[in-house]
């Protein structure tokens, strides 16, 4: 499994998204892209098909969380969209994760990589204790969810690059860590709290970095993407 940079297409329309992708037209490598709730809810499955037809690999970041049967059926639909990676909330339980894998598996046995969200990076220790009534240290909760995901047969988790080493230690080196919160040295942090550079994420053992604003808001997005690739993949 090679390391790669995933560009977050955090746009609210097809027009804006395609105008952004057009800026990569001359590139030798088509970026692996992430389609999240904003773009998917705005444009529906058609945008997934269109970007796939342009030759991009796709991480469909819809973070499913419902009863096992509903998630299984929804995953079967997403699998038909031929995406390369998708995700769900580990908080939906092992039964939900197992059902999701079943739904995602195509008749020929292949399936997109299924990744779990553990605790959202926007959830603090305090909110987890008071709102969710989970009274364990946050990092322990994250590792426990990662283990459950691994035991359910998932391919990996979304986590901070700072947690990648620990996840690999407890779930195995082949268990993927997909890590947002990446910034160039001296770049705008925005609303991310704990950030690392692409080079540091590589040292920490991330398998995929998810990069949004440092590329989408750059004056030269293709140049910023190339820089990320050079620093992270080598
Ligand atoms: O612009 P930025 O590089 O911060 O974008 C990061 C992307 O990764 C966004 O699409 C964000 O929703 C996503 N993400 C994240 N933290 C998580 C899960 C997803 O930043 N824990």
Image (tube, rainbow, N blue to C red):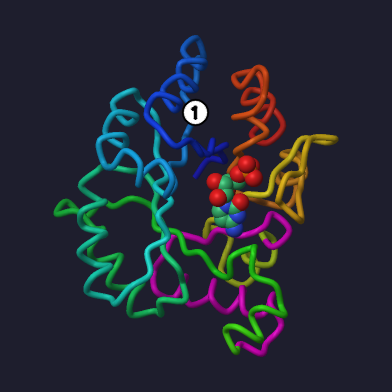
Please state which of residues 22 and 52 is positioned toward the viewer in this rendering: 22
Under circle 1, the secondary element is loop
In magenta segment, residue 143: yes
* Residue at x 24% of width, y 67% of height: 72
Please state which of residues 1 and 117 is positioned toward the viewer in this rendering: 117
Residue extending farthest to the right is 186
Residue 134 at what x, y percent from top left?
61, 87
- Residue 163, image quadrant: bottom right
Residue holding disc 1: 31
* Residue at x 25% of width, y 35% of height: 46
In magenta segment, residue 199: no
Vertically, is 24 above or below 149? above
Quarter in which the C terminus is drawn: top right
Residue 4 at what x, y percent from top left?
55, 38
Vertically, is 11 above or below 172? above
Q: Residues within 10 Å of mark 1 (few under 14, many from 20)?
A: many
Residue extending farthest to the left is 107
* Residue at x 66% of width, y 78% of height: 127
Residue extending farthest to the top is 26
| Residue range of the region highlighted in magenta in the rendering | 134-163
Name the side, left or right, on which 212 lies relative to 23.
Answer: right
Residue 232 at what x, y percent from top left?
68, 36
Can residue 177 be seen?
Answer: no
Residue 199 at what x, y percent from top left?
75, 39
* Residue at x 68% of width, y 77% of height: 138
């Amino acid at each position: 499994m090679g390391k790669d940079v995933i560009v977050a297409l955090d746009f609210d329309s097809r027009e804006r998204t395609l105008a952004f992708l057009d800026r990569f037209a001359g590139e030798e490598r088509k970026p692996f892209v992430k389609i999240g709730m904003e773009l998917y809810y705005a444009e529906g499955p058609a945008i997934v098909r269109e970007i796939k037809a342009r030759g991009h690999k796709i991480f469909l970041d819809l973070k499913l969380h419902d009863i096992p049967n509903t998630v299984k059926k929804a995953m079967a639909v997403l699998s038909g969209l031929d995406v390369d990676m998708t995700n769900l909330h580990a908080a939906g339980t092992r039964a939900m994760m197992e059902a999701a894998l079943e739904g995602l598996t195509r008749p020929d046995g292949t399936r997109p990589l299924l990744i779990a969200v553990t605790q959202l990076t926007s959830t603090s220790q305090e909110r987890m204790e008071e709102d969710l009534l989970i009274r364990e240290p946050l990092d322990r909760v994250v590792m426990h969810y990662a283990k459950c995901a691994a035991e359910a047969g998932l391919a990996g988790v979304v986590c901070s690059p700072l947690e990648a080493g620990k996840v690999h230690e407890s779930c195995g080196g082949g268990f993927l860590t997909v890590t947002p919160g990446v910034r160039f040295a001296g770049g705008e942090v925005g609303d991310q709290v704990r950030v690392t550079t692409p080079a540091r994420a590589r040292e920490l053992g991330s398998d995929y970095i998810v990069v949004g604003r440092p590329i989408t808001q750059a004056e030269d997005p293709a140049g910023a993407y190339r820089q990320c690739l050079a620093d992270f993949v080598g």
